[in-house]
Image (cartoon, rainbow, N blue to C red):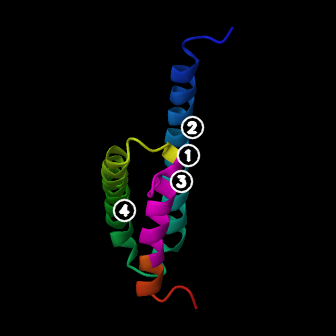
């Protein structure tokens, strides 16, 4: 017999996995930026740049949750997989615009 708590346990496990992935990618991003930052700015600016980058990553994630949450609320009657915006799609659109703007694709 399936536990009545199973949906809650699965949701919590998914949340933990997403949170762990975000922390991991934030750390990877900071390491990568630290590896190359001195090639593009004076060493005395690197710490300030990384601190601002970390704060901006947290701000952006908050914006993503707010935007995607609004979309999910608007489409509450649909299955989650049917929503027109998922976190991944929302981020991909944002990154695609950045890559085009900065000439990174060619």
Mark 2 and 1 residues: CB-CB less than 8 Å, in contact? Answer: yes
Q: Nearer the viewer, residue 1 or 31?
A: 1
Residue identifier under label 4: 53
Residue 94 at x, y percent in the picture: 42, 70
Q: Residues within 10 Å of mark 1 (few under 14, many from 20)?
A: few
**Element under label 2?**
helix
The residue positioned 58% from the left and 18% from the top of the image is 6
**Element under label 4?**
helix
Q: Nearer the viewer, mark 4 or mark 3?
A: 3
Q: Nearer the viewer, mark 4 or mark 1?
A: 1
Mark 4 and 1 residues: CB-CB less than 8 Å, in contact? Answer: no
Q: Nearer the viewer, residue 73 or 10?
A: 73
CA gap between label 4 and label 1 equals: 18 Å
- Residue 25 belongs to the span the image colors magenta: no
Q: Residues in magenta?
A: 81-96
Q: Quadrant of the N terminus?
A: top right
- Residue 88 belongs to the span the image colors magenta: yes
Q: Nearer the viewer, residue 70 or 95?
A: 70
- Disc with the residue nearer the chain's start (2 vs 4): 2
Residue identifier under label 2: 17
In the rendered image of this protein, does residue 48 appear above or below residue 27? below
Residue 21 circle label: 1
Q: Is residue 22 left or right of residue 67?
A: right
The residue positioned 57% from the left and 37% from the top of the image is 17
Mark 1 and 3 residues: CB-CB less than 8 Å, in contact? Answer: yes
- Disc with the residue nearer the chain's start (2 vs 3): 2
Asked where in the image residue 98 lies, by quadrant, the reply is: bottom left
Q: Quadrant of the C terminus?
A: bottom right
CA gap between label 2 and label 1 equals: 6 Å
CA gap between label 2 and label 3 equals: 12 Å
Residue identifier under label 3: 25
């Amino acid at each position: 017999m399936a536990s009545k708590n199973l949906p809650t346990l699965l949701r919590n496990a998914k949340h933990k996995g997403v949170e762990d992935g975000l922390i991991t990618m934030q750390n990877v991003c900071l390491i990568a930026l630290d590896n190359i930052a001195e090639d593009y700015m004076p060493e005395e600016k690197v710490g300030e740049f990384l601190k601002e980058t970390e704060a901006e990553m947290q701000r952006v994630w908050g914006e993503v949750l707010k935007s995607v949450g609004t979309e999910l609320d608007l489409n509450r009657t649909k299955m989650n997989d049917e929503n027109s915006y998922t976190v991944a799609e929302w981020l991909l659109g944002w990154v695609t615009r950045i890559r085009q703007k900065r000439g990174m694709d060619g």
